[in-house]
Image (spheres, coloured by chain):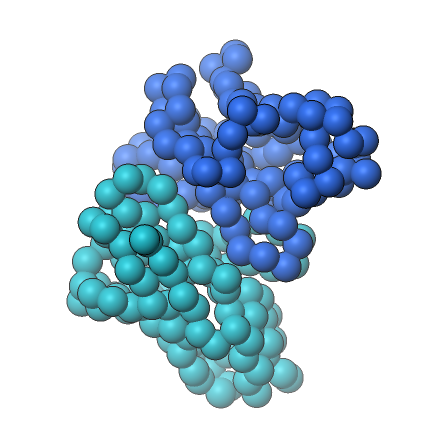
């Protein structure tokens, strides 16, 4: 059964304190792994798509990496405005997209 | 980034009633999706729609639900005979735009409250 597990569930960091969020997955025929940011009461906001192991993508203070079993979202020198829930999702060969429960990130000023 | 609007932003309905949630993609895309997110829980896939027909659906998407694209632009989700447990945020998403990419872009959601 396809599955996505994110850890930690919640993370509190001081402003400027770098860290990484983990997304472990099992899926048949990975077509893509996605990272989204979700603010309270809003729809998920697209961040990255990763298609194959070894791929990396960056956007401002965020960098996403992918292996055959997991993905990391690295956040460098975060700011309070980076506080949000970060969602990982995978799309398998059957086209369904499965989301993880997310990591709630809180950056303290 | 493609824009997606959803109406209404909040819908309150009584148990047993039918609701129609609407999604309007601003740009041309090939694939349309509906997801739901019960408060405090993860985003759940409901259905994908391509070329005017359902391409995939989850176990959640039973006979109570239906989708259509009646006028070639709006994409609707109909929920018949609503139940208390249908209360959730419902998100529309689109993909397969100009670059035919897999990225899905989400709308702001409709909050459905069933009383």
Q: Quadrant of the C terminus of chain B?
A: top right
Observer-nearest residue: A107 or B78? B78
Residue A50, image x, y percentages: 27, 57
Q: Quadrant of the N terminus of chain B?
A: top left
Residue B11, image x, y percentages: 75, 34
User: Which of the 4 image quarters holds residue A83?
Assistant: bottom right
Q: Is residue B24 visible?
A: no
Position of residue A68 relative to residue B42, above or below, is: below
Q: Is residue A51 left or right of residue B21?
A: left
Q: Residue at x 28, y 39 (%)?
A: A94
Q: Residue at x 33, y 34 (%)?
A: B96
Position of residue B40 relative to residue B108, above or below, is: below
Chain in cyan? A
Q: Residue at x 55, y 65 (%)?
A: A85
Count every numbered label the image shows and give the total.
0
Residue B83, image x, y percentages: 70, 35
Q: Residue at x 79, y 35 (%)?
A: B12
Colour that chain B carries in the picture: blue
User: Which of the 4 image quarters holds residue A13?
Assistant: bottom right
Q: Is residue B106 left or right of residue A109?
A: left
Q: Is residue B114 visible?
A: yes
């Amino acid at each position: 059964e396809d599955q996505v597990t994110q850890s930690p569930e919640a993370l509190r960091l001081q402003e400027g304190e770098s860290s990484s969020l983990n997304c472990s997955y099992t899926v048949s025929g990975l077509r893509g792994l996605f990272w989204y940011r979700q603010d309270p009461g809003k729809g998920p906001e697209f961040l990255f798509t990763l298609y194959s192991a070894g791929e990396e993508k960056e956007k401002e203070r965020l960098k996403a990496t992918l292996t055959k079993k997991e993905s990391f979202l690295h956040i460098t020198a975060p700011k309070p405005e980076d506080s949000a829930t970060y969602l990982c999702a995978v799309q398998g060969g059957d086209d369904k997209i499965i989301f993880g429960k997310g990591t709630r990130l809180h950056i303290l000023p | 980034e493609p824009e997606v609007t959803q109406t209404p932003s909040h819908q309150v309905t009584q148990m047993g009633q039918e609701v129609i949630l609407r999604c309007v993609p601003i740009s041309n895309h090939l694939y349309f999706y509906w997801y739901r997110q019960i408060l405090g829980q993860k985003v759940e896939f409901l259905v994908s729609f391509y070329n005017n027909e359902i391409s995939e659906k989850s176990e959640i998407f039973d006979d109570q639900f239906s989708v259509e694209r009646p006028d070639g632009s709006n994409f609707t989700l109909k929920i018949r005979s609503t139940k208390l447990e249908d209360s959730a945020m419902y998100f529309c998403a689109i993909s397969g735009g100009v670059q035919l990419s897999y990225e899905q872009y989400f709308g702001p959601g409709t909050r459905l409250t069933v009383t």
